[in-house]
Amino acid sequence: MKYLIVLMLLFVGALNAEDGYPDDGLEEYKTKSSEQTVLKPNSSLVISVVGQGVAPSFTISPAQAYALAKRAATADAYRLIAEKVNGVQVEGKDTIRNMVMQRSTVNTQVRAMIKNATIVETTFKDGLCEVEMEIRLDYSQFN
């Protein structure tokens, strides 16, 4: 078993050496991969997402159920756009006692300012509301 782990580590080290990225630190890898430009001059990028929201069971009327489900779906769509534009910060923590996993938690966080997102389509069926939202990013917005 120990030999298998050593072989796997050597194999992963060889892969890192072949791809041209240093295997001694993640920071330089981040720097190299972030140099690629997604948005080029005189071009635009359209990001499209579908947010989902469920109507709560305690509503007074179908109109209230629709309004609450649409609000939840819109908030979900904004979150999905923020995840695509800015990324997601993930933090994990495992608690191990006597070589047995006791607790595992994963927290995610997204921070972004979203402007000019438009709702393309809204559907509501069987208590589920889906909102299709898109945002257009132009190269000129960032210069």
Image (cartoon, rainbow, N blue to C red):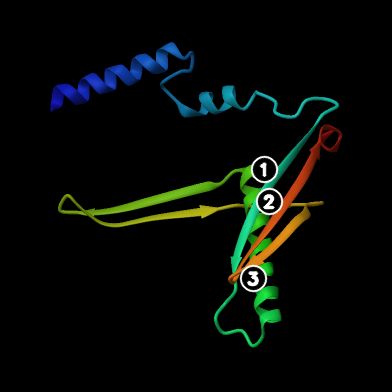
Badge 3 or badge 1: first in the primary sequence: 3
* Picture coordinates of residue 71, whole percent (x, y): 68, 68
Q: Amino acid at mark 3?
A: Ala
Q: Secondary structure at mark 1?
A: helix
Pick the quarter of the image with the N terminus: top left
* Picture coordinates of residue 51, whole percent (x, y): 63, 57
Q: Nearer the viewer, mark 3 or mark 1?
A: 3
For the residues bearing labels 3 and 2, Cβ distance under 8 angstroms = no
Provide the residue designation for mark 3. Answer: 69
Farthest bottom residue?
60
Q: Report whether 44 appears left or right of 57.
A: right
* Residue 74: quarter of image: bottom right
Q: Secondary structure at mark 3?
A: helix
Residue at the image point whose x is 68% and y is 68% from the top: 70
Q: Amino acid at mark 1?
A: Val
Q: Could you tell me how far apart the alpha carbons at marks 3 and 1 are, in whole angstroms? A: 24 Å
Q: Nearer the viewer, mark 2 or mark 1?
A: 1
Q: Secondary structure at mark 2?
A: loop
Residue at the image point whose x is 60% and y is 52% from the top: 110
Q: Residues within 10 Å of mark 1 (few under 14, many from 20)?
A: some
Provide the residue designation for mark 1. Answer: 85
* Picture coordinates of residue 117, whole percent (x, y): 78, 52
Farthest left residue?
1
Is residue 54 placed above or below 50 in the rendered structure? below
Pick the quarter of the image with the C terminus: top right
* Dot label at residue 112: 2
Q: Residues within 10 Å of mark 2 (few under 14, many from 20)?
A: few
Residue at the image point whose x is 70% and y is 25% from the top: 37
Badge 3 or badge 2: first in the primary sequence: 3
* Picture coordinates of residue 58, whole percent (x, y): 56, 84
